Image (cartoon, rainbow, N blue to C red):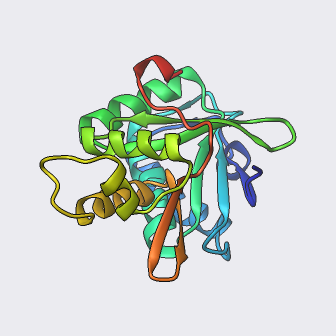
């Protein structure tokens, strides 16, 4: 899989350290402009590769709202790519503090997505839903309701809510098949769990 658009953040920002919430707020419009006119099914990679550090405060002010706008406003799929360990540690602490999770990965020199992983924390129900989709490949809420019975769940609506929440974070691609929404992970190699994190 190759992203439709790759944005090199150091070139766009002009510096290798991205810090401070005010700087993040000021950068957000520029970031949104760089990704404008993307179709709803596009994958947009934000390349952290040449950056020394992105702080939690900058990420919170620029990249979290970019993710939310991409998924809930326009509908394209953002991927944060090639972040170093220091940046991942900053974002992981922020994500865990606020109970959020973000899609990160690595890109090859040719621009192909090599791997993807979750930075942050999913609640137990979302984590189980993600694991089920990784096993099945693609499914709808009704199928998950049948294949993974839960005494606390009386209808497929609960599965539908979990799928929608994961799609809003950019982890799942959705498509309509008649009146049914089918979901699959954005990348087959998506990893979640402590031992799988960088």
> Is any atom of residue 62 visible in this view?
yes
Which image quarter is the C terminus in?
top right
Image: 174 above or below 17 = below
Is residue 58 depicted above or below 143 in this figure?
Answer: above
Q: Residue at x 15, y 60 (%)?
A: 154
Residue 151's x, y, as percent? 13, 47
Q: Is 141 situated left or right of 30 in this image?
A: left
Q: Residue furthest front?
A: 146
**Residue found 48% across the figure and 51% down from its top:** 63
Of 77 and 140, the residue lying toward us: 140
Q: Seen from this angle, which residue lies furthest top?
A: 195
Residue furthest toward the bottom?
A: 178
State the image coordinates of residue 24 (x, y, percent, origin top left): 46, 51
Task: Report the residue that reaches farthest toward the right.
Answer: 110
Foreground: 54 or 103? 103
Q: Position of residue 139 (x, y in %)?
A: 48, 57
Residue visible at 42% across and 26% down?
Answer: 193
**In the rendered image, is residue 65 in sight?**
no
The number of callouts visible is 0
In this picture, residue 16 sits left or right of residue 133: right
Residue at x 17%, y 54% (from the top left corner) = 153
Coordinates of residue 132 in the picture (x, y in percent)? 42, 43
Examine the image and state in which quarter residue 120 appears: top left
């Amino acid at each position: 899989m190759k992203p439709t658009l790759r944005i090199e953040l150091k070139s766009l920002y002009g510096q290798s350290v991205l810090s401070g919430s005010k700087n993040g707020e000021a950068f957000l419009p520029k970031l949104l402009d760089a990704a404008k006119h993307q179709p709803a099914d596009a994958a947009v990679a934000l390349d952290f590769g040449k950056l020394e550090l992105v702080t939690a405060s900058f990420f919170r002010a620029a990249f979290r709202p970019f993710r939310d706008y991409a998924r809930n406003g326009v509908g394209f799929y953002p991927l944060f790519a090639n972040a170093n360990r220091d940046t991942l540690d900053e974002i992981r602490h922020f994500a865990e503090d606020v109970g959020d999770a973000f899609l990160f990965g690595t890109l090859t020199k040719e621009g192909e997505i090599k791997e993807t992983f979750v930075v942050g924390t999913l609640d137990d129900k979302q984590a189980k839903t993600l694991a089920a989709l990784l096993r099945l490949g693609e499914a709808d809420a009704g199928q998950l309701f049948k294949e993974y019975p839960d005494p606390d769940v009386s209808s497929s609506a609960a599965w539908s809510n979990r799928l929608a929440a994961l799609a809003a974070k950019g982890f799942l691609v959705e498509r309509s098949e008649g009146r049914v929404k089918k979901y699959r992970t954005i990348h087959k190699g998506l990893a979640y769990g402590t031992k799988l994190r960088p």
